[in-house]
Image (spheres, grey):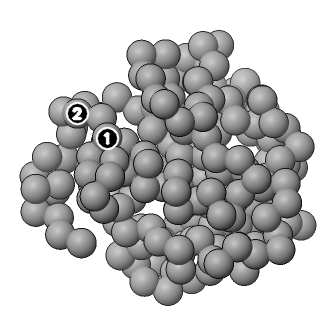
């Protein structure tokens, strides 16, 4: 169910990676009777003003997309986040990686209900590793400035940047929400 905080939050589906371990684009895998890219787009749309798929220079999609900026020459999800902020610096971004098939309406609702726009971001804490999960996070507009500085220093780990900032860190209701599927074996053994 959409929340009143929908205004000025955009959605970003991170899918610009190489998918080298999977051997095929993870955004095109089918878990829910449609591609994961389409599933996440449909899932995020009621919560966000606009939803975009983050793509690299070699990818195409029929959905609204933001292409990774070429001047950031690192292979990391941080490039997709930076590219989104570069186009819409005054928006908050609900970011979800395309390889997280268990994210659902309840996940997004919980994240939005517990959002703290006074912080740099609102993220789930990975209870096994005790770090903020950067691939299922709300990044506030204020995140853009330290993101730019971080990239200028040649750094690329979004999790490390989140750890250095004042963020809202949430306890995940179900750790399975954070599960990502990266290999063909994981995909073949995965059941919803």
Circles 1 and 2 in contact, beta carbons < 8 Å = yes
Q: Determine whether 154 is above or below 116 in the image.
A: above
**Is residue 88 shown left or right of residue 14?**
right
Q: Is residue 1 left or right of residue 167?
A: left
Disc number lying in front (1 or 2): 1
Residue shown at 85% from the left, 60% from the top? 7
Q: Callout 1: few (<14), some (14-19), or many (20+) C-alpha neighbours within 10 Å? A: some
> At which x and y percent is residue 101?
35, 61
Q: Observer-nearest residue: 73 or 26? A: 26
Residue position for label 2: 24
Residue 100 falls in image quadrant: bottom left
Q: For the residue labelled by badge 1, is the local secondary structure a helix, a strand or a loop?
A: helix
Taking the spot 53% from the left edge, 36% from the top edge, the residue there is 63
Q: Residue at x 26, y 52 (%)?
A: 30
Which of the 4 image quarters holds residue 174? bottom left
Q: Position of residue 122 (x, y in %)?
A: 70, 67
- Residue pictured at 58% horizontal, 24% vertical: 68
Q: Quadrant of residue 129?
A: bottom left
* Circle on res. 45: none
Tell me: residue 99, above or below residue 79.
below
Question: Which residue matches tag 1?
Answer: 28
């Amino acid at each position: 169910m959409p929340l009143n905080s929908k205004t000025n939050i955009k959605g970003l589906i991170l899918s610009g990676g190489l998918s080298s371990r999977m051997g095929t684009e993870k955004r095109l895998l089918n878990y829910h009777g449609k591609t994961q890219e389409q599933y996440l787009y449909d899932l995020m749309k009621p919560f966000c003003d606009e939803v975009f798929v983050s793509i690299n220079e070699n990818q195409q999609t029929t959905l609204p997309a933001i292409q990774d900026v070429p001047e950031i020459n690192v292979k990391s999800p941080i490039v997709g986040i930076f590219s989104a902020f570069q186009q819409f610096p005054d928006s908050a971004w609900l970011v979800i990686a395309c390889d997280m098939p268990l994210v659902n309406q309840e996940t997004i609702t919980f994240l939005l209900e517990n959002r703290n726009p006074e912080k740099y971001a609102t993220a789930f804490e990975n209870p096994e590793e005790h770090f903020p999960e950067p691939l299922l996070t709300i990044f506030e507009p204020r995140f853009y400035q330290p993101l730019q500085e971080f990239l200028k220093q040649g750094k690329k780990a979004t999790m490390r940047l989140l750890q250095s900032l004042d963020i809202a860190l949430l306890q995940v209701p179900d750790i399975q929400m954070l599960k990502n599927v990266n290999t063909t074996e994981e995909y073949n053994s995965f059941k919803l």
